[in-house]
Amino acid sequence: MLEIKALDLDDEAAVQAYADVRIAAHPASSRERIIASLRETNPDFDEVIRLIARRDGEGVGITSVGLLGGMNARLAIGPITVHPEHRGQGVGTALLEALLPELRARGRDTFESWGVIKGSAGEQWAVARGFRVAASRVMQLLTIAGTDPASWEIEAPPGYRLERWIGVTPEHLLASVAVTRQSIHDAPAMESALRAPEWTPEVVRAEEAEARAGGVEQRVAVAIEEATGLVVALTDVALQPGDSAHARWGSTMVTPAHRGHGLARAVKAHMLRWLLADRPALESVDTGTDATNAPMIRVNEQLGFVTDREVVVVSRSL
């Protein structure tokens, strides 16, 4: 008999069953890391709903869905994962049916999953259950041991300099950081319900404070125009507590007037040199880019990233 319950972190058998499903679906995953992540605060979400489906005590499916705040307070994001040996048996549908009332009760009106393999049975399953494909993304992976560090030896173009910081933007750069972050709105449009904030100095400070509260080390590398002293390109990486081997890239943006000069590549290369100097245990970095954003995909390739998979964002109203 299939039993679906909220994951109880004090129930060791349930936690292990949850990890079993994750590892079966993603064999390269670390059991220790999966379990540790369950107890970590994720600053991206106001709350995380985790359900586990078990049959005779065995984990057969899981879902971990984050509830966003602010302007995205009606959106929930996360995957539904079914153990490969139990697919096609209605487990995913049962998890979805158990999840939706939980989301509605918390005022959510849209549910999205961002990691569905493009063209897979998972995409077909989602579309058959009322989801629509809202975007296509290219997931790229940088394996440190397999990359020539010489590809990161890139200086700032003439007329610019590179700077960096952890956690708190220097006050004299705050206004131009907000302007540069606002240029993310020029990125290729997608039909996801997720909305980027309208960046102001106050929003920058609020985001920084939220990261600190969650124990996240937010690293920022920027390019500054020498003539004006203003930030015109920026990239960031949020390092999660407890995981020294892996990192996920955040966002990269260049203001419109300064595009085409190689600034995105320069700030990202600067970030990689910085990360490796401070974190010698780092093994890999992953990043996701909208499939239509060919220039950024090409920049990542020049730095040693390779395409790991193509995924779609699926979205449905509740």
Image: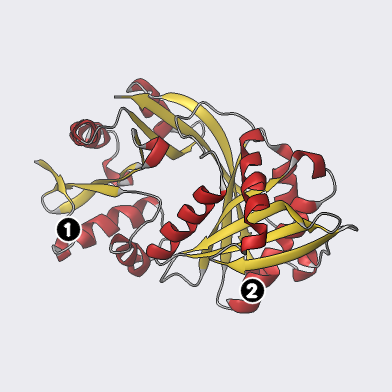
Front one among 299 and 224: 224
Is residue 305 at least partly visible in the picture? yes
173 sits to left or right of 150 = left
Q: Quadrant of the N terminus?
A: top left
Label 2: how many residues lie within 10 Å, few (<14), some (14-19) or many (20+)? some
The part of the image, by quadrant, that contains residue 290 is top right
| Quadrant housing residue 96 | top left
Q: Which residue is mark 1?
A: 14
Q: Secondary structure at mark 1?
A: helix
Query: Looking at the image, is mark 1 or mark 2 nearer the viewer?
Result: 2
The foreground one among 239 and 37 is: 239
From this view, report whether residue 116 is shown above or below residue 277: above
> Where's the C terminus, which quadrant?
top left
Q: Residue tagged by mark 2?
A: 276
**Horizontal and vertical percent position of residue 157:** 87, 57
Task: State the residue at coordinates (48%, 34%).
Answer: 195
Q: CA distance from mark 1 to mark 2?
A: 37 Å
